[in-house]
Amino acid sequence: MASQGDRSLPTIIRFRNSLACVPCRSRHVKCDAAKPNCVRCGMDGKACFYMKSRRGMRYKASPPDESETQATVAKSAPAPPLLPKVTSSETTSPALDPSNQPSQVLTPCSATPESHCLLSQKNTACLSNNSSSPSSTSKEPLPKPSKSSLETNLSLYYTFFHNAHPWVVPRARLDRLVQSSRSQIEELLAVMEYVGSTYTAEGQSKFLRQRALNLMLLPFLRKTAFNVQALLILAVAVHSGGDFRQARATLDRAISIALEIGMHFKSYATANARGDPVIEESWRRTWWGIFVVDGCFEAIHRSQTFQTWHIHADVDLPCEELDYAKEDIPPPHTIAEYEERDFADEEIIFSSFAYLIDVLKILGSLMAVVNATGSNPDSIIDDTDSSLLNWKLHLPDSKKDVLRTDGEIDEPLFHAHMYYNVIQVVLHRPRSCLLHSPVENTSQCAPPSPPSHVPPTKQHIYHLSTKKALSAAEAALTIFTLPTPLINHTPLVVCGVALSILASLSACSWVLDGNEYEAARNRIRLGIGTLRVYGRTWPVGQRTLMEIKSIAREVFRMKDERKVAEMAAVDLSFPELEGFDEQSYLGDWQTMEYPSIFDITSIV
């Protein structure tokens, strides 16, 4: 009996590890491996999907030409090459073979089962033939935008969005890809066009958003690195539009495809760039872009889904932004070189993107412990604080200021400094004097209130945490005073702005007074103004703005009520002094003769 049980146990473990869906596996929870959706994902409302098993197979750098599902839909259509070889004539526009153009993927959607629809219930345009929505794709395909519209929106994308999310190739290289290999990047172009349209007031954004979702969220989407880029960009845009659940599902799919085609391996970029260093750099940036966005989503929602932090990746680090923009790609640095930089004989200056990755790694270490224990032990707080301090101390002088020598903002470095400060706020506020108000729970960005706060009799030992949290909140807000349009920064910092405002509100309510109080209120106004600017483009900014303004009104109202109560509680009666006769004292005042007004005038 015992030997039989011993033999059966490994079988159970192998079954669970091989068949668990990606969302359950990333959260380390049990999965019944039901298809198309497991029970747990159905109960949690998450998009359920499975990674193709690579057990027994050696890693191949080249991705599959097409997914199995797509091969079933169109067996006779040959897969296009991943990329054309870079030649001097790559700017020439070849005749595009219509058979290689992706069909308007709206039509096959009507044949997909309803259970395969990845859109959340909040989206009325579900990609199934059972959808009763007026915008259901089974009724009428969406028209393609005009060429002039595409050019305009691509220009807007590169002007306002690309610098803060530098994953796609530079604009000049994209134009050449459009000429030579458009069939491979149709989905990517659709997503970029949608994102660019959000910066205009022409009313195209809603239509282009639906078109991008229709193209990207089909089960038989081609599994290519370009489509991973498209899913990554779409996840950021959908999240900034306020649909957090759909954004998570979109990012999860980008991660799944990236892992399946091997983008987390160093060899992928080299093997799939056809000798083009710019494309090779773009693939590296795409993987690390997934890592950064995954970490940002975890920091915002604390949903225990920082999947890429648990994945061993040996992808080389991205180069500097100016080198990428000029298509002058130097030999990449490795992760090992970065981790050993403190012991090098000479200082090595890594790219701003590399320092951003490091900040998110520190966040991942913190969240892994918090998710496992459900709390922030003092030892973990101290370790994370030390890691953040080391990150700051070992920054080269050229990376301590997010303003470059040419007067432009280094957006990846801006993002890194912003998250450095926000992590400090989240880390130190729970054990500081900055009390959490119940009204903060109305904010989508606020973490859950701690179960208990430091007793007032012991709060004197937490003044250091109070100072650190306040200093970080001040730095996170004042960084937006730099001379650049606020909308050029990534919308992924909106919740970081909100958390810094909430810490400053608590300081105004409980800690600060005088000039420090006025300075903190001015920083709160700065943060609210920043959210207002974001809200003009991204719905998440508008919603966060309204939440923060409502919380601020309530916090200051409660502060005023406490002042009134404190004044009412002041004892204005006479002190009890030994030998003091109150009646005799009052009597003397009552019998005293006072000079008249005329006597006083004569004396003067």
Image: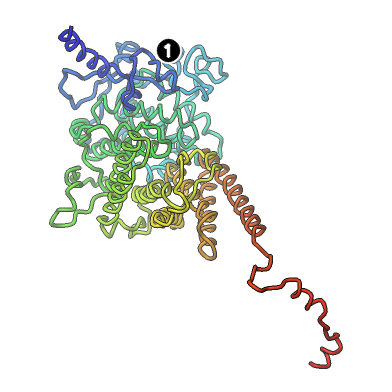
Image position of 602 with respect to 446: above or below: below
Q: Label 1, secondary structure: give it.
A: loop
Residue 149: percent from the left, percent from the top?
Answer: 48, 35
Which of these two is toward me, 65 or 500?
A: 500
- 459 vs 344, left or right, is right
Which of these two is toward me, 431 or 56?
A: 431
Which of these two is toward me, 448 or 257?
A: 448
Image position of 132 with respect to 541: above or below: above
Quadrant (top left, top right, bottom left, bottom right) of the N terminus: top left
Count of numbered tags: 1
Residue 132: percent from the left, percent from the top?
Answer: 56, 15
- Residue 553 visible in the displayed image: yes
Q: Dot 1: few (<14), some (14–19), or many (≥20) neighbours within 10 Å?
A: some
Task: Report the residue at 59% width, 45% height from top.
Answer: 550
Which amino acid lies under the numbered mark 1 shown in the image of this protein?
Answer: Thr
Colour logic: rainbow
Residue 590: percent from the left, percent from the top?
Answer: 81, 76
Quadrant (top left, top right, bottom left, bottom right) of the C terminus: bottom right
Task: Report the residue at 30% width, 11% height from top.
Answer: 75
- Residue behind mark 1: 112
Dividing the picture into quadrants, the one containing residue 184 is top left
Identity of the residue furthest to the bottom in this view: 603
Residue 300: percent from the left, percent from the top?
Answer: 42, 39
